[in-house]
Image (tube, rainbow, N blue to C red):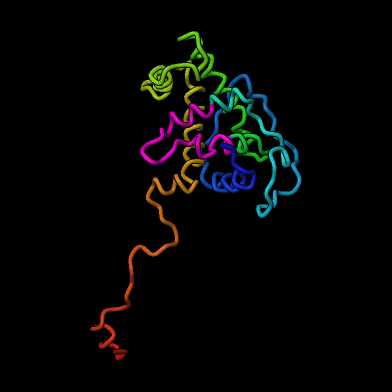
Amino acid sequence: MRIDRRTAIQWMVAASAALHVPTVTFAAESAHAGPTGYGKDPDLLKTYSAGDLWPLTLSASQRKLAAVLCDLVIPPEGDTPGPSALGVVDFIDEWISSPYADSSRDKPVVVEGLRWMDAQARAQSGKDFVDLTAAQRSAICDQLIATPLPAAMTEAAAFFMRYRDLTAIGFYTTPMGMNDLGYRGNVPLARFDGPPKEVLQKIGLA
């Protein structure tokens, strides 16, 4: 599934308000410099095509890995599909590709983190991450949340935490994700027939 650019940008607005966890860049990307300018903010009432505002970052293989990892963070359950089926990879790609300060800092974290996942999978099993079994994928991710955390995995663990944040923000700002939380929005929760009769009598309205 590919979402439209307008939806992805609306998600970014929500994410920018929610994502205030400091980012950690990988050593290989520590010299990454942010943009010096990007022009006007996008018109949220217009539907944009991919690439109209800025080129997206992730390659086809990176998007495939990102989708697998999203669904590992929040697996599909019952009638609720996983994040990849709801276009969350588009949101993440849009987020790290945009020229804003927070998202620009996240770009090297996500790109290098995805590269690390593949490298770790090959080192352990001789296969890319997407070709591993569900148990093998989970085992690699479990290493990143272990306590105590090996010093060699500090940066990879920071990536995984950030990726979980991005996945959760993308997922829980979709209608299906909000429904999964039980959020109903601006709708009446129960029928209201007005104040009790005795209250109206007391104030002389009945």
Above/below status of 45 relative to 21:
below
Percent x, y for residue 14? Answer: 55, 48
| Side of 7 where 36 appears, left or right | right
Who is closer to the viewer here, 79 or 122?
79
Q: Any magenta on residue 124? A: no
Q: In this rendered view, identify the residue nearer to me: 94 or 17.
A: 94
Task: State the residue lying farthest toward the left.
Answer: 198
Magenta stretch, main secondary structure, is: helix
User: Which quadrant of the view contains residue 58?
Assistant: top right
Measuring 60% from the left and 43% from the top, which residue is drawn there?
Answer: 8
Residue 189 x, y percent position in the rendering? 35, 62
Rendering quarter of residue 106: top right
Nearest the viewer among 154 and 180 is 180
Residue at x-position 54% and y-position 44%: 15
Q: Residue at x 49, y 17 (%)?
A: 131
Q: Quadrant of the N terminus?
A: top right
Please state the horizontal and vertical placement of residue 145, each as a whole percent of the image.
40, 25
The C terminus, quarter of image:
bottom left
Magenta range is 66-92
Residue 84 lies, in percent from the top left, at 50, 34
- Whether residue 78 appears in magenta in the rendering, the answer is yes
Apparent side of residue 126 relative to residue 204 in the rendered image (left or right): right
Examine the rendered structure and indicate whether residue 119 appears above or below residue 42: above
| Residue visible at 50% across and 36% down in the picture | 85
Disc tally is 0
